[in-house]
């Protein structure tokens, strides 16, 4: 009977060794924030990128409060390599990552198209808040500057201008004369670059560098040809201007 139990235990360990369902999961389970991505000589760190690795062999990943992938993972204890497989994504042709864990920090390394990719992660207790999460809400014009000249009173003499950045990636903009326009907004995944794409086909898309001075102050610096010399500062509102 004892020999039979030993055989059953040996079979169990053989089946699950190197998999995400090992009895004692590796140290890298938990919630991790990607601090830095180095692709050869290029720095390619995504904004607020995170991954949550579960001991049952599953994981989720996302940016800020948005989850955008999930799947399964396996771990080879012999060579300390980690292989995530996305459930609904494209096939990853580059193979597993070499993993090193030291306390609350972890490093993934592999070669992609002849270049060494090094991903540095740090353990965290909560999802990071991206710039795309922070800019959502209702914003009123506080100050507008063009070529170092204050144009606030020209742009909004009656204090009616606002922009409402909604969670569903739609924005609504009210001009000084009370007319409203709408469109889609997009935040770059690697830079704090906000692009507003009007629903009206005769209006150009405009890109801005977005900076949150604090939770109640948003600054947009023009990046397109038509707004490059503009800096617009907004303050968060709790109700729509009359």
Image (tube, helix red, strand yellow):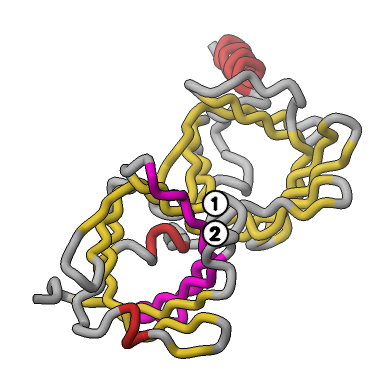
Judged from the image, the secondary structure of the residue bearing numbered disc 2 is: strand
Locate residue 82: give its quadrant. top right
Q: Residue furthest left?
A: 242
In front of the other: 230 or 42: 230
Residue at 53%, 23% (x, y): give it.
Answer: 89
Residue 59 on the magenta segment: no
Horizontal side of 79 relative to 125 (left or right) equals right
State the residue position of label 1: 188
The circle on residue 202 is none
Q: Residue furthest right?
A: 114
Spatial CA span between label 1 and label 2 = 5 Å
Horizontal side of 5 relative to 174 (left or right) equals right
Q: Are marks 1 and 2 in contact (CB under 8 Å)?
A: yes
x and y percent of residue 97 in the render? 75, 36
Locate residue 223: give its quadrant. bottom right
In front of the other: 130 or 61: 130
State the residue position of label 2: 193
x and y percent of residue 135 in the render? 37, 65
Q: Which residues are magenta?
A: 202-222
Q: Residues within 10 Å of mark 2 (few under 14, many from 20)?
A: many
By secondary structure, the bulk of the magenta-drawn segment is best described as: strand
In front of the other: 234 or 88: 234
Judged from the image, the secondary structure of the residue bearing numbered disc 1 is: loop
In this view, 2 is above or below 194: above
Residue at 55%, 45% (x, y): give it.
Answer: 29
Residue 2 visible at all: no
Residue at 19%, 70% (x, y): give it.
Answer: 177
Residue 208 on the magenta segment: yes
Residue at 79%, 39% (x, y): give it.
Answer: 98
- Quarter of the picture holding the C terminus: bottom left
């Amino acid at each position: 009977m004892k020999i039979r139990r030993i055989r059953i235990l040996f079979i169990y360990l053989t089946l699950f060794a190197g998999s995400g369902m090992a009895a004692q999961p590796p140290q890298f389970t938990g919630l991790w924030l990607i601090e830095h991505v180095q692709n050869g000589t290029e720095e390619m760190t995504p904004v607020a990128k995170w991954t949550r690795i579960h001991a049952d062999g599953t994981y989720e990943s996302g940016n800020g409060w948005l989850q955008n992938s999930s799947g399964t993972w396996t771990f080879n204890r012999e060579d300390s390599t980690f292989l995530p497989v996305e459930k609904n994504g494209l096939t990853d042709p580059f193979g597993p990552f070499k993993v090193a864990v030291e306390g609350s920090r972890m490093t993934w390394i592999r070669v992609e198209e002849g270049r060494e990719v090094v991903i540095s992660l740090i353990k965290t207790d909560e999802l990071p808040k991206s710039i795309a999460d922070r800019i959502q809400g209702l914003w009123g014009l506080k100050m507008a500057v063009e070529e170092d000249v204050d144009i606030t009173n020209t742009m909004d003499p009656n204090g009616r201008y606002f922009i409402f950045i909604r969670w569903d990636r739609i924005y609504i903009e009210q001009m000084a004369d009370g007319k409203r326009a709408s469109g889609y907004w997009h935040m770059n995944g690697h830079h704090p670059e906000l692009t507003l794409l009007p629903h009206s086909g005769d209006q150009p898309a405009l890109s801005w560098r977005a900076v949150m001075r604090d939770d109640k102050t948003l600054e947009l610096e023009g990046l397109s040809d038509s707004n490059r010399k503009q800096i617009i500062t907004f303050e968060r509102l709790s109700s729509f201007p009359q």
